[in-house]
């Protein structure tokens, strides 16, 4: 199944524009009357019929479709996951994480900048394109939200109510695995565990001050095992651990 993405969706019609329309009509050579499957990024999967194709030399490509059927929740999960990850020096590695995390399932990716970060910016549009491609490839109808970069300090002042808050770092201390933290949350009286946020530091790890601030804000330290992992490996390991814990 080939998926397309649109935000221009009405009651009985939707429109593909730009790259989505060009890929549909020029690359895949779809014609009027063909069936398409389109996601809205918020859980909706639309089965449509192409009613009109516009590929003028001047102007934006456009594919008009009539909606035949709507399915909701395709590729959904029973938990919400926010990954706050420091961008890697090599941006391709961060994009690799975004791609694989999207395939497994993540709701929000927030690039955070630590006192020890080498890279302090990301190209948001580029990362969004990677996430969209991975969403369509993995047949999901939910598109993760990619936020702008913020400092670790700014991020830690955010409120995450009824959320299990975790931080992975390399300092010594009383740490538990992510599964143990999930089990603790599940056995508690609150609804924590269905909503999770995980912080992953840069190549040089979080600073001592950042770790102390996170702990003071209710973040629980976790271990990802005895190996020293790259940033993108650690981040994906966390996503995988939560993903597999949810289907056990």
Image: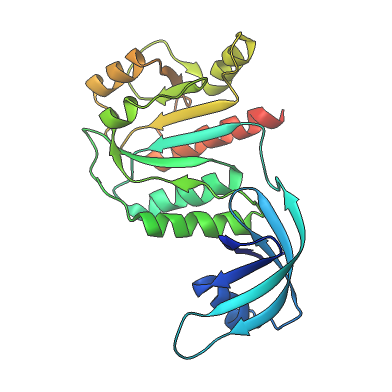
Residue 210, x across and y down, in percent = 27, 23
Quarter holding the C terminus? Answer: top right
Q: Is residue 66 left or right of residue 134?
A: right
The quadrant in which residue 227 appears is top left
Residue 196 in picture, x, y percent from top left: 52, 27
Task: Give above or below for 7 relative to 164.
Answer: below
Residue 151: quarter of image: top left
Question: In this rendering, is residue 169 above or below 121?
Answer: above
Q: In front: 226, or 199? A: 199
**For this view, does 206 lie left or right of residue 159?**
left
**Which quarter of the rendered picture does the N terminus lie within?**
bottom right
Can residue 234 be seen here? no
Residue 11 visible? The answer is yes
Q: Residue at x 41, y 26 (%)?
A: 168
Nearest to the observer: residue 172 or residue 104? 104
Residue occupying the point 47% across, 29% down? 197
The relative height of residue 76 versus residue 188 in the rendered view (above or below) is below
Identified at 52% across, 46% down, the residue is 144
Depth check: 215 or 238 in front?
215
């Amino acid at each position: 199944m080939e998926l397309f993405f649109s935000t221009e969706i009405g009651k009985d019609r939707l429109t593909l524009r730009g790259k989505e329309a060009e890929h549909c009509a020029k690359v895949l050579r779809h014609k009027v009357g063909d069936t398409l499957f389109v996601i809205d990024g918020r859980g909706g999967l639309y089965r449509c019929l192409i009613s009109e194709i516009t590929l003028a030399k001047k102007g934006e490509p456009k594919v008009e479709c009539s909606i035949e059927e709507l399915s909701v929740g395709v590729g959904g999960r029973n938990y919400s996951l926010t990954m706050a990850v420091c961008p890697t020096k090599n941006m391709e590695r961060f994009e690799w994480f975004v791609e694989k995390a999207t395939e497994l399932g993540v709701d929000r990716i927030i690039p955070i900048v630590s006192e020890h970060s080498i890279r302090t910016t990301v190209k948001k549009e580029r990362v969004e394109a990677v996430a969209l491609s991975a969403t369509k490839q993995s047949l999901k109808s939910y598109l993760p939200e990619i936020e702008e970069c913020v400092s670790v300090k700014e991020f830690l002042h955010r409120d995450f109510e009824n959320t299990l808050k975790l931080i992975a770092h390399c300092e010594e201390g009383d740490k538990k695995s992510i599964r143990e933290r999930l089990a603790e949350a599940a056995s508690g009286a609150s609804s924590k565990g269905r909503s999770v946020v995980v912080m992953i530091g840069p190549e040089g790890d979080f600073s001592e001050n950042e770790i102390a601030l996170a702990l003071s804000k209710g973040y629980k330290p976790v271990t990802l095992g005895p190996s020293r992992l790259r940033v993108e490996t650690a981040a994906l390991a966390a996503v995988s651990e939560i993903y597999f814990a949810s289907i056990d």
